[in-house]
Image: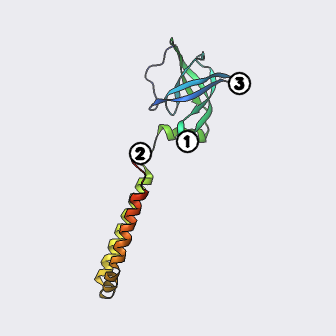
């Protein structure tokens, strides 16, 4: 049977991941298979294993740094080509943790929250620093004291900037 028409329920991630296919009892069918077109609902497998439509399978899917999913699936379609057996595998009964691992790959965060947090901290620093400087410079009592500390503050800022440059990882 050939792949179904475009009936996709979710977007596919166009890449390939290492896959181990097992039958329902746990016997290895292909330990060098590949998973393509990964989505929240399943993937397309490229293997040497002869799969049949409706067949229950188990699999171990390695998702790079995100982790590994060991779960069950059902073969939705198959296609025999000269070099490989292709099959659409729908997930069945993924645990909460496995779904979470899968979502890290199929739905990456739209923002890098560490960068956002760093920029928010820098903005807060400059807002508080500016408000404090305005308050100190508007008070005659504190103005003289602040001006006497100015050389030490400038030196500390210069040393901090130099330290940041030295500690910055090299660009590739």
Horizontal side of 117 relative to 57 (left or right) equals left
Q: Earlier in the sequence, mark 1 or mark 3?
A: 3
Residue 93 shows in this picture: no
Label 3 packing within 10 angstroms: few (<14), some (14-19), many (20+) = few
Q: Does residue 41 lie above or below 169 as drawn? A: above
Q: Secondary structure at mark 1?
A: helix
The answer for how far apart the CA atoms under marks 1 and 3 are is 26 Å
Front residue of 90/49: it is 49
Q: Is residue 170 above or below residue 120?
A: above
The residue drawn where x is 48% and y is 18% is: 3
Number of other residues with Cα within 10 Å of mark 2, as a class: few under 14, some 14 to 19, many 20 or more: few
The disc at residue 100 is 1
Can you name the residue that lies furthest to the right here? 25
Q: Which residue is mark 3?
A: 25
Residue sitting at 45 percent across and 24 percent down? 7
Residue corresponding to mark 2: 110
Q: Mark 1: few, some, or many residues within 10 Å (few <14, many ≥20)? A: some
Residue 85 visible to the viewer? yes
Find residue 49 and report its horizontal and vertical position in percent: 60, 17
Pinpoint residue 94: horizontal percent, then vertical percent.
Answer: 60, 35
Q: Nearer the viewer, residue 26 or 89?
A: 26
Secondary structure under tag 3 reads loop
Give the mark nearer the N terminus: 2 vs 1.
Answer: 1
């Amino acid at each position: 049977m050939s792949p179904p028409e475009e009936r996709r329920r979710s977007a596919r991630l166009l890449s390939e991941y290492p896959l181990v296919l097992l039958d329902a009892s746990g016997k290895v069918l292909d330990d060098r298979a590949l998973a393509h077109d990964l989505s929240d609902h399943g993937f397309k497998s490229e293997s040497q294993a002869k799969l049949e439509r409706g067949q229950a399978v188990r699999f171990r899917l390695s998702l790079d740094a995100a982790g590994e999913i060991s779960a069950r699936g059902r073969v939705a379609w198959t296609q025999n080509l000269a070099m490989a057996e292709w099959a659409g595998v729908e997930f069945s009964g993924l645990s909460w943790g496995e779904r979470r691992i899968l979502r890290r790959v199929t739905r990456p965060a739209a923002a890098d929250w560490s960068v956002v947090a760093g920029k928010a901290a820098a903005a807060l620093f400059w807002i508080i620093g500016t408000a404090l400087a305005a308050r100190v410079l508007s008070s005659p009592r504190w103005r003289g004291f602040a001006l006497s500390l100015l050389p030490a503050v400038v030196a500390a800022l210069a040393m901090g900037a130099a330290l940041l440059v030295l500690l910055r990882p090299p660009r590739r």
